[in-house]
Amino acid sequence: MTITIALPSKGRMKDDASAIFARAGMKIVAVGNDRSYRGRVEGWDDVEIAFLSASEISREIGSGAVDFGVTGEDLVREGLADADARVEFCARLGFGHADVVVAVPEIWYDVDTMADLGDVAADFRARHGRRLAIATKYWRLTQQFFSGSHGIQLYRIVESLGATEGAPASGSADIIVDITSTGSTLKANHLKILSDGVILRSEACFVRARKAVHAEDPVVDRIIASIRAAL
Amino acid sequence: MPLINLPAFAGDLLADFERMETLRVDTPVIQPAEPFLDMAGEDLRRRIFMTQSETGESLCLRPEFTIPVCIRHIETATGTPQRYAYLGEVFRQRREGSGEFYQAGIEDLGEPDTARADARAVGDAMQVLANRLPGRRLKVTLGDQSVFEAVIAACGLPAGWQKRLIHAFGDPKQLQKLLAELADPKSAGVFGHEVERLAIMGMLEDEDRLVAYIAQTMEATGYSTNTSRSPRDIARRLKEKLELANTRLDKTTLAVMREFLTLDLPLADAPAALFGFAAKSGLKIEAALSLFDARVAALSRAGADIGLIRYRAAFGRPLDYYTGLVFEIEIEGTAAVLAGGGRFDRLLTLLGAREHIPAVGFSLWLDRIEHAVATAGGVK
């Protein structure tokens, strides 16, 4: 059986992932030219590399189209319902750190916890004639965190695919759920993270699609062991 | 539209509805998604089938009938009181069972006699179920949001705490969590550094100065142009939060609230028990209780079998448009809810009605009823 591993196709993520694979004794070489979207692993004939965008990788692992992938935990948990049943997080790779957080305007002096936000949300309609609006691209994580963990139902999600931090100041949403690594962009936009508002501490992970055939393939275990040993 | 997959009893059910003096209405299967998400919250998004129009408007397949029937009522400017009946397919993503199934029900809009309308909703739901399931013993669970709200108010909590508790009604886990917080002096609210600074500047005592300061900061940071919370909103809630943090429930009050939430008894005994509870604990909740009492009396007058109904004080629905009665009907000894309903006096105004329209209704899960009819087999 050929095992397919999906890796980020560009940028820091690609370089960091390649470095770990090299340390694991799995040197990746591009097939054809440097820009090729396919690769192989030196000395591992039954392993194939597919270079994809990070969000595609989480989708392909979810559907089982690839066997392994390197991608952010946030993308996997956002992209897949019931993620832990469908994929295994084999290793946390120590790069691509980003927290998915709930951030509100700094000027909301009365709001520092999710409980405060729950109070504000419960009252919002009566005061403003509409629900509290959250700008985010993380629909699933937001719903799980607000409804599941904090019993907050009364809000609306406004989809935001970029420059989410600007939404509260521009008035297109009241608060945001977004990723941050240093917090400087939030600060520049006069937003603060709630004290219990970290939804997920994400980083790049080595992820396996849970496929029944993997149980019979010794290469699968060897790959996982090699990557873990390289960390 | 010819529907050949209707439950066999659909015709009889509609005949029942007609005898119950209702107007049968239909609503489009494809509905704007906004009102549903607005009323029920974002959590619904995962459970409905959504799509978009060519112009980008969010649409969904009708997930239930209450909101479309109410919107139709507002749009057609029909007078009240008006009793509507519906029977049709609804579409929801469910863990078990098909994503499309039939629901039927009655919405009673604008009836000024609350007790009578409530009794009629419960009685009609019991009647149509009894007609489909002769010989099966029904079990009705009844709760009352307004009695709960009256108890909370009479306990003398600050407004912020009342709101929190009322909001959690029907969510037992959340409610217990809040009661535990109220009892525990350790769990004071979290305040940021900014608030300490404001305290040192003496702004927390002077609302107008605080409002001016917030407005000025908003101006400087570019937040003044948005339509979100105003400086006054923030200042008021900050004061409310300081109050919240300083409130501890004494043991007696907490015990009273806990005792209330454990009430679970036959409806016939509930009025006396509630009046007794109020007298013993010194709570002034007569107004809510007399309405409760009037509803029980109206149910008896309407000929409903009150012996099948239990009152459970903690029974509610965590949706902010339910305002009073809530109920569910099962077959004794089974877990499937066959009918659910309640009073939603706020919904029509939220949906845009100009005047206040009281409303109560129920809906029936026809697939579950069909299943119950089938498993009844020869049982008589």
Image (cartoon, rainbow, N blue to C red):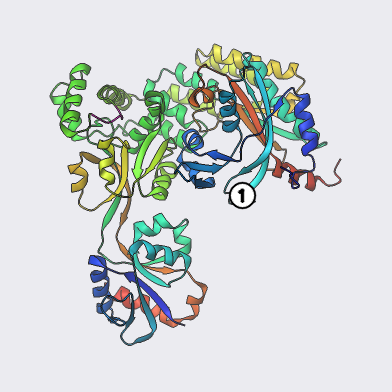
Residue B233 appears in the figure? yes
User: A180 and B5: which one is in front?
Assistant: B5
Q: Identify the main secondary structure in magenta.
A: loop
Q: Position of residue A210 (x, y in %)?
A: 47, 69
Residue at 44% in and 28% down: B165
- Could you tell me which chain the residue with mark 1 belongs to? B
Mark 1 lies on residue: B99
Question: Compared with residue A27, is residue B153 higher up or lower down, i.e. above or below?
Answer: above
Q: Quadrant of residue B117?
A: top right
User: B58 and A213: which one is in front?
Assistant: B58
Residue at 76% in and 25% down: B305
Is residue B30 toward the left or the right of residue B45 in the image? right
Residue B143 appears in the figure? no
Residue B37: in magenta span: no
- Using a 10 Å C-alpha cutoff, classify the residue at mark 1 as few (fewer than 14 neighbours), some (14 to 19) or many (20 or more): some
How many numbered tags mark residues here? 1
Question: Compared with residue B122, is residue B115 higher up or lower down, i.e. above or below?
Answer: above
Q: Position of residue B75 (x, y in %)?
A: 56, 25
Determine the secondary structure under disc 1. Answer: loop
Disc 1 marks a residue whose amino acid type is Gly
Is residue A162 toward the left or the right of residue B262 in the image? left
Residue at 29% in and 33% down: A111
Locate the N terminus of chain B by quadrant: top right
Magenta residues (range)? B225-229
Residue at 42% in and 63% down: A59
Q: Position of residue B298 (x, y in %)?
A: 70, 16
Residue B228: in magenta span: yes
Q: Quadrant of residue B310?
A: top right
Question: Compared with residue A22, is residue B321 higher up or lower down, i.e. above or below?
Answer: above
